[in-house]
Amino acid sequence: MANFIRNTQVKAMTSIWAAKQKARELTDRTKEALVNREGQGTLDVAITVLISIVLGALILAGLYLIVDSTVLPTITQRIKDMFDYAG
């Protein structure tokens, strides 16, 4: 019976020690994650990409308006003039 009690105490102490060790490891990993500054530039890159996309869309929209209102009517008229001969 004394052997059973001693084994139970050893198992309990081992479990407590393992739980404390896991808590220490979790604390260390949490501290390391909070101190780590490697991902700090990610937001800057995301904002730069977003600005690039918006500016690209504005440039394309401007080009489309220029082509649609200025270039296409001129090209259409020239094509009609080329094929409209009274020969």
Image (tube, rainbow, N blue to C red):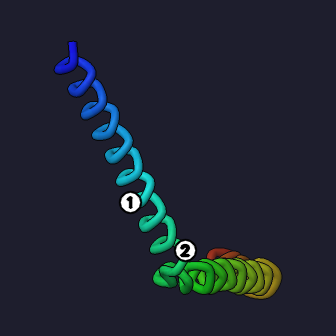
Residue nearest the viewer, comparing 22 with 17: 17
Disc on the earlier residue, 1 or 2: 1
Q: Is residue 77 left or right of residue 48?
A: right
* Residue at numbered disc 2: 34
**In which quadrant is the N terminus drawn?**
top left
Quarter-wise, where is residue 83 in the image?
Answer: bottom right
Q: Pinpoint residue 73: horizontal percent, then vertical percent.
A: 78, 80
What residue is shown at x 32% (from left), y 39% (from top)? Answer: 13
What residue is shown at x 17% (from left), y 20% (from top)? Answer: 3
Q: Is residue 9 above or below residue 36?
A: above
Residue nearest the viewer, comparing 68 with 55: 55
Q: CA distance from mark 1 to mark 2?
A: 14 Å
**In which quadrant is the C terminus drawn?**
bottom right
- Dot 1 lies on which element? helix
Task: Please give the label number shown on residue 39.
Answer: none
Visible residue check, residue 77:
no
Q: Is residue 20 left or right of residue 84?
A: left
Q: Residue furthest top?
A: 1
Q: Pinpoint residue 79: horizontal percent, then vertical percent.
A: 65, 78
Q: Amino acid at mark 1?
A: Glu
Q: Amino acid at mark 2?
A: Leu
Q: Is residue 48 left or right of residue 62?
A: left
* Residue at numbered disc 1: 25
Q: Residues within 10 Å of mark 1 (few under 14, many from 20)?
A: few
Quarter-wise, where is residue 9 in the image?
Answer: top left
Q: Is residue 8 above or below residue 84?
A: above
